[in-house]
Image: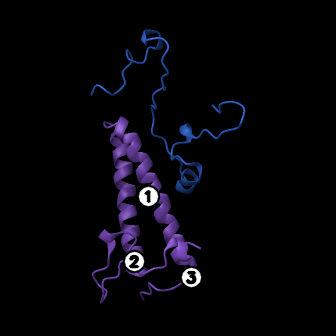
Chain colours: A blue, B purple
């Protein structure tokens, strides 16, 4: 496993230095069955589709 | 029939162009994923599958209409046919 690949130890959030921002790792590469939907949504991964609602995050 | 000078796209041409757009986006987005997940064999398979579909679609477009990029310039035409379609600001994408 290369250095930049994730492992469990690296992802234990309480071991991370404080005061920094982190992005959770994308674990699966599930894509839209309909490629056109990915094109229109701006990502081929449904997990990463986060339309801006103007109020809060879309989980 | 090859007609690179036509000002209006047929429904078939528009459809093929949209397929190329969609496939291009898929390939770019999956490549970004693979940059951070280089050991994901399934993702590599998907990438290879759709990258081939994209190459084929571009080749089909070049043979039916006009080359979208220089590597697809037709070898069958009588003349060098790069840039033989209207550009977007000339109505090529209407």
Horizontal relation, residue A50 to residue B51: left or right: right
Q: Position of residue A33 (x, y in %)?
A: 53, 50
Taking the image as drawn, is residue B92 in sight? no
Inter-mark Cα distance, 2 to 3: 16 Å
Horizontal relation, residue B48 to residue B22: left or right: left
Q: Mark 3 or mark 1: which comes first in sequence?
A: 3
Q: Position of residue B48 (x, y in %)?
A: 34, 53
Chain letter of mark 2 equals B
Say which residue appears at 48% left-offset and 23% top-offset: A22
Which residue does the numbered mark 1 point to in the structure image?
Answer: B24
Say which residue appears at 38% left-offset and 76% top-offset: B62
Chain letter of mark 1 equals B
Q: Are marks 1 and 2 on the same chain?
A: yes
Disc 3, disc 1: CB below 8 Å? no
Position of the N terminus of chain A, as image quadrant, is: top left
Q: Position of residue A4 (x, y in %)?
A: 32, 27
Which residue does the numbered mark 2 point to in the structure image?
Answer: B83
Which residue does the numbered mark 3 point to in the structure image?
Answer: B8
Callout 3: 10 Å neighbours few (<14), some, many (20+)? Answer: few
């Amino acid at each position: 496993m290369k250095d930049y690949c994730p492992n469990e130890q690296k992802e234990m959030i309480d071991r991370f230095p404080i005061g920094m921002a982190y992005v959770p790792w994308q674990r699966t590469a599930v894509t839209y069955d309909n490629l056109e939907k990915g094109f229109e949504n701006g990502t081929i991964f449904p997990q990463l589709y986060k339309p801006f609602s103007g109020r809060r995050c879309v989980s | 029939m090859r007609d690179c000078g036509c000002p209006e796209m047929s429904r078939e041409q528009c459809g093929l162009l949209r397929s190329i757009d969609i496939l291009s986006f898929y390939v770019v987005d999956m490549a970004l994923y693979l940059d951070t997940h280089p050991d994901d064999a399934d993702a590599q398979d998907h990438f290879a599958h759709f990258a081939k579909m994209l190459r084929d679609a571009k080749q089909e477009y070049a043979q039916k209409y006009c080359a979208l990029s220089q590597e697809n310039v037709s070898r069958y035409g009588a003349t060098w046919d790069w840039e033989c379609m209207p550009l977007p600001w000339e109505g090529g994408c209407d």
